[in-house]
Amino acid sequence: MIEFQNVTKRYGKITALRDFSITIDRPGIYCLLGRNGAGKTTLLKAIAGHIAASSGTVMVNGKAAGMLAMPGNVHFVEMGAAQFNIRLTGLFNAAAEINPAFDTGFALKMARRFRLDLKKRYRQLSFGMKAMAGTLIALSSGKDILILDEPVLGFDPVMRKTFYELLQESCDAKPRTVVVSTHIIDEIAKIAERLIIIDRGQLKLYCDMNEVDEKAYSVTGPAEYVKAATDGLRVIGETRAGGFLSRHIYDARIETSGNYSVASLGLQDFFIGLVGGEKEAM
């Protein structure tokens, strides 16, 4: 379990998290979204104990987490983090020596699946391959909580697809809590089970992905009919083209009629509407 109780984190005059509270109490893949500077990386580092809260409490499995008490069951992968400049086989073996729960066989199997050259030293790898090596170490760690900060940064589309498949397979084989921060939003929506959105250091939304699927939609048609149909609903964005209006809604779903159409809203459009400023239905 991960629990933030009224956590505030300041860096000088900048407040990265502000009175932030959340409880993550079951295994699954959690998608963490927020604009640049919203506090995502601060949140992830606080879970791993890499930073200390200015006030409030961060608890991981019932114990306070912090720089003097880093949780042993958390593996944090930060893109760009340095690794020993040794061959990948040596890197995996070193991880196994440090962590007896490390699954070397799984790491080697997945490295071959991603066509990683096991004979190359770490610094000889491309940026994307370095990121994949770090991610494989995390997925092979045996830890109960994995924190992945922009894990697909530098991946090509084929690598991203394979990564998501690997992440899903890994969690199916060993249920765990995985928190993934990403800017490639609609792709993570295919495997994420719960959604966390933060904005300006505060929790904006925390819900099951099923709720977003059910309640996030667009209503499109002649402006007068769309306005009448969405009156009183939670409108999170809209676009106009001539006399036509498309409104993005996060509320109880309405049915399509002969005067307007109703369609599901992608996670990216939903996120943009939610953090970009909601509108009042008029």
Image: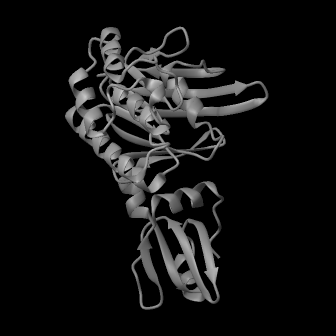
Rendered location of residue 279, percent (x, y): 65, 66
Q: Residue at x 43, y 21 (%)?
A: 60
Residue sitting nearer the eye, 52 or 134: 134
263 is higher (above) or lower (below) than 87: below
Is 277 displayed left or right of 129 in the figure? Answer: right
The image quadrant of residue 240 is bottom right
Q: Residue at x 40, y 35 (%)?
A: 132
The answer to whether residue 25 is visible is no
The answer to whether residue 241 is visible is yes
Rendered location of residue 185, percent (x, y): 47, 53
- Quadrant of the drawing holding the C terminus: bottom right
Q: Residue at x 37, y 27 (%)?
A: 138
Is 112 displayed left or right of 55 in the figure? Answer: left
Residue sitting nearer the eye, 231 or 173: 173
Rendered location of residue 176, percent (x, y): 30, 31
Is 35 displayed left or right of 180 in the figure? Answer: right
Residue sitting nearer the eye, 99 or 134: 134
Q: Residue at x 43, y 63 (%)?
A: 215
- Quadrant of the drawing holding the N terminus: top left
Rendered location of residue 26, percent (x, y): 33, 34
